[in-house]
Amino acid sequence: MADFKVINTQEELDAIIKDRVERAERKIRETRDSYKDWVSPADAQKAAEEHQAQIDALNQAHSKELEKYAGYEDKFKELEAQIHGYELKALKAKIAREKSLPYEAIEFLKGEDEATITESAEKLSKFSQVSKASQAHGFTRDTETEEADGVLAAFKQLNPNIKL
């Protein structure tokens, strides 16, 4: 307590009190300044409501856009399948042309890629070559055997002008 000083005059008391008042005011100002960027609960609630309204409006716009484009994905898949079918048919026609098959033979070609379609075309081509060779060598149906067939004979009796 060596620092204790007796206050004898009003001016000394005012100086001590003034210093304490200035410190208290400075502390209050600093505290108030630290709350300057803070928002009151009412303002925070109002901002939250505004943001929620914006979110709702954006969600409604988004759902309208989704409804607008909902059928396009299915349509796109359908068109892709159709394009794939056209490409496959064109590939089959190309391979049939390369293997000297008639255009109608495309229906009998099997496969989804060039290798399997080519293999199918080669098999069909061999079959058509065997058929052409048998016709060239005179292997046809025996007419005597045909007449022996009861159904065919009856048909020929009813239609004598038709050549089978």
Image: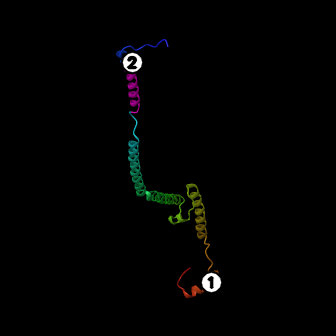
The earlier-in-sequence mark between 1 and 2 is 2
**Res 27 → quadrant:** top left
Instruction: Check disc 1: other Cα within 10 Å, few if <14, some if 14-19, many if 20+.
Output: some
Does residue 132 appear to the left or right of 66 in the view shown? right
Whole-percent x, y for residue 71 in the image: 44, 59
Q: Indicate which label's residue lies in the foreground, 1 or 2.
A: 2
Q: Residue furthest front?
A: 8
Q: Can you say whether 162 is above or below 33 in the image? A: below
The residue at which mark 2 appears reads as 16
Please count the marks in the image: 2
Residue most extreme to the bottom: 158
Q: Horizontal and vertical percent for residue 160?
A: 54, 86
> x%, y% of residue 63?
42, 55
Three-letter amino acid code at disc 1?
Glu
Residue 32: within the magenta? yes
The quarter of the picture where the C terminus appears is bottom right
* Foreground residue among 129 and 69: 69
Q: Secondary structure at mark 1?
A: helix
Q: Residue at x 58, y 57 (%)?
A: 116
- Residue drawn 40% across the image and 36% down it: 38
10 Å crowding of disc 2: few (<14), some (14-19), many (20+) = few
Residue 99 circle label: none
Label number found at residue 147: 1
Question: What range is drawn magenta here?
Answer: 15-35
